[in-house]
Amino acid sequence: MANEIPYKIYLEESEMPTAWYNFRADMKEKPAPLLNPATHQPASVDELSAVFCRELAEQELNNTDALIPIPEEIRSFYKMYRPSPLVRAYCLEQKLGTPAKIYYKFEGNNTSGSHKLNSAIAQAYYAKKQGLKGVTTETGAGQWGTALSMACSYFDLDCRVYMVKVSYEQKPFRREVMRTYGAGVIPSPSDTTEVGKKILAEHPGTGGSLGCAISEAVEYAVSHEGYRYVLGSVLNQVLLHQSVIGLETKTALDKYGIKADVIIGCAGGGSNLGGLIAPFVGEQLRGEAKYKFVAVEPASCPSLTRGTYAYDFCDTGKICPLAKMYTIGSNYIPAPNHAGGLRYHGMSSTLSALRDQGILDAVSYRQTEVFAAAEQFARIEGILPAPESSHAIKAAIDEAMRCKETGEEKTIVFGLTGTGYFDLYGYQKFNDGEMQDYIPTDEELAKSLESLPQM
Amino acid sequence: MANEIPYKIYLEESEMPTAWYNFRADMKEKPAPLLNPATHQPASVDELSAVFCRELAEQELNNTDALIPIPEEIRSFYKMYRPSPLVRAYCLEQKLGTPAKIYYKFEGNNTSGSHKLNSAIAQAYYAKKQGLKGVTTETGAGQWGTALSMACSYFDLDCRVYMVKVSYEQKPFRREVMRTYGAGVIPSPSDTTEVGKKILAEHPGTGGSLGCAISEAVEYAVSHEGYRYVLGSVLNQVLLHQSVIGLETKTALDKYGIKADVIIGCAGGGSNLGGLIAPFVGEQLRGEAKYKFVAVEPASCPSLTRGTYAYDFCDTGKICPLAKMYTIGSNYIPAPNHAGGLRYHGMSSTLSALRDQGILDAVSYRQTEVFAAAEQFARIEGILPAPESSHAIKAAIDEAMRCKETGEEKTIVFGLTGTGYFDLYGYQKFNDGEMQDYIPTDEELAKSLESLPQM
């Protein structure tokens, strides 16, 4: 396996990005604006600032500045766990017998176990800078809650995580990581909010839902002095922070003179994919290069592959701004699956615009084939991947196998967003042959889309 | 925090060691030999080869060759997860307000979650090279079993892990990682061995013990064609493989002109500590440098700090060779604690010899103070440490705080052997204030030492 390209490309600290890249600045046709759900007028920074930190609200609506400097404090934190390695999957290539060259950007080498920390630390920083006491959020699978707990602990911010009650009880270890980082973890629905009390009264014994947890987190933030609500995906600000993934990837590739052909990422709300492809999309938008960008989503929650491009509610509580996006309807409740991070009914409005403009491809996979790819990858490359990340693995392997058929020596880059250490219940189901696939029927999707707002 | 030394020192692949370092070759006074338990004569390679792979048996008894080349196949595997970073704990130093400089060698960035993989892949390689079908081992906490599963999967070897039944049931996720890597995981005691059947008959419903699991693993290996038994610590061969930790550490320090003053590692069987300090011990043995080496053990299992230096059984089944070591008696059953990797009654005979020769210091800590240090470290440095590793963290923090008192600018290096993602039950007990400390009385230790063999 003699090759000048090492197994893992680690950048020097001096090569780490000093500014995030906002590819909306290079889009000729901008993403559709967020709308106030009451007036249907574009949401302003002032409106968003009631819920979000002010600087984050500004980032949310900034379609013009390509480079947003990364504050020194955030860069210091990044240096504790970044740069993340760009790994050449020599072993996987060999086992597949493909002429393709496969690289993955691995974001799992931090305690939160995923890329979520890249945005969590940024959001915590701006909250601290604004003089806030704390932030609130919701968590389902727990990756985002863990990342935010770590970030708040670093900046001595109070962190209140509303955790879907069924997850709180079934994933005690995720909960303990958050508590170890000093976060308050509240099973949702709870009696700490009006909406929580109402749901508890109507549905005693309920296991909760992500929609309910969001509503509680938002209510607590807007009704308590010195608190704001933060979100781990979907939003433009999150994609912006996640551009650190793509910027490091591009620097690493450039350093070795490698040109990617295909860039693949899993997509739930879209933050990892949007971050990974950011600088490459920029090149393509500026006419400097051409890539195949692929979003990979679960067949059980197929917003990009089977959804509609329309304004929809971002939350089931219908209190957040409306976003134009690929959506399967805010009432859609995905069937149980083991990729908790890919269960959002919509998709980042910016990625949705790229899809609408023909720049972004999308595929979907069933979870059993995703877990089969995950297990194959774990055994060959030595990393136990998160179920979410494994969607990208499956797509990358399929692309590499097509290269084997055609003899093409494509360079495939995919995002390996995290590790599966807290997802072993899913692996157990798979190992025991008890995992099932769920694919919504056209009728179900059509019915769900009836919940779209009247515009 | 401007400084020429980066947060993380990553070596280039070309700087990774090509040979392990066997510091026994540089010891004037060699460790006492392993003895045949029946004859009390030094064990030969032939005798050891009945249980262990031949080349590993040779490594076990090799007191003369300082450098053992690392086979190309193992070096390739190492490149998938090594070099591991040597981290400058800037944030910890700042929070402690110490003039000391703190570095840690972090071995947790691989799916097994610890340094165990360094020896697992070597042992699997020699088993494959010898043409074996598979290997057997035991696991309690699960780190070693996971590492071996990964290594066997890479070389297509059968892997049978006897897992203490109570762990098998209480740690289903560790079990699932091993299964995902294709290992057969058998709750011990089992009906797959004579010793297992006997124990089941005598103690129906028992949760098993590490001693019983070892006995089953050894029995299966010696009674099945093409199988050998492998062990994850204590043995010289394991310390040899783990020298990759120290060699990388030394290269990284040398690259930046850093001279360590104090080198600290947790010690259960001693493999991580022995590997970390190996090249530095070599320098000291050759009179080229002087260091303070510190072994850190739990107060509940204090072999180095309160044990006797004597020949003892290595296993509770008393079938393995006798080793001269610091021991608290093979009948000693440590009180329950949450550092499962530090519950061995003895200590590597080579490290024991260093201790006897005045080269190795030792301290012990109670688990509550260890978890407090672990939580402090997690919040400041962003890594959730394994309870075992946290013993070294506690000792390093104490050393740094002494520097704060004296104003000394010592350079402290410690081994951060792994992550605590599968140890959250311990963190939960700590977070809930329910963790207790156990310290054996002098009477208990004296009684336990009555089980020493008559020599």
Image (cartoon, coloured by chain):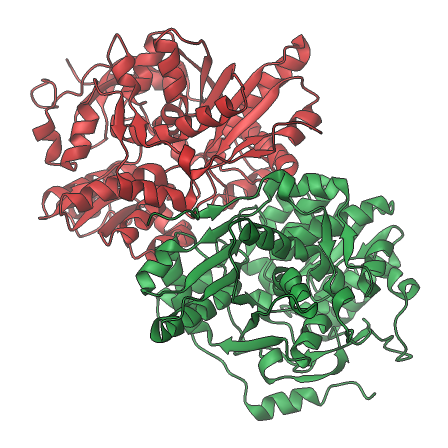
Chain colours: A green, B red
Residue at the spot x=28%, y=44% of the render?
Answer: B73
Tell me the quadrant of the picture where the C terminus of chain A can be found: bottom right
Q: Residue A156: in sight, yes or no?
A: no
Q: Is residue A28 above or below residue A450?
A: above
Q: Nearer the viewer, residue B337 or B447?
A: B337
Residue A107 at x, y = what percent? 55, 52
Q: Is residue A312 left or right of residue A448?
A: right
Q: Quadrant of residue B267?
A: top left
Q: Nearer the viewer, residue A194 or A61?
A: A61
Q: Is residue B33 above or below residue A190?
A: above
Residue A405 at x, y = what percent? 34, 75
Report the number of discs. Answer: 0
Q: Is residue B336 left or right of residue B351?
A: right
Q: Is residue B445 above or below residue A277?
A: above
Q: Is residue B233 above or below residue B441?
A: below
Q: Quadrant of residue A142?
A: bottom right
Q: Is residue A411 left or right of residue B163?
A: right
Residue A50 at x, y = what percent? 89, 61
Q: Is residue A39 left or right of residue B383?
A: right
Residue A151 at x, y = what percent? 69, 46
Q: Residue A19: in sight, yes or no?
A: yes
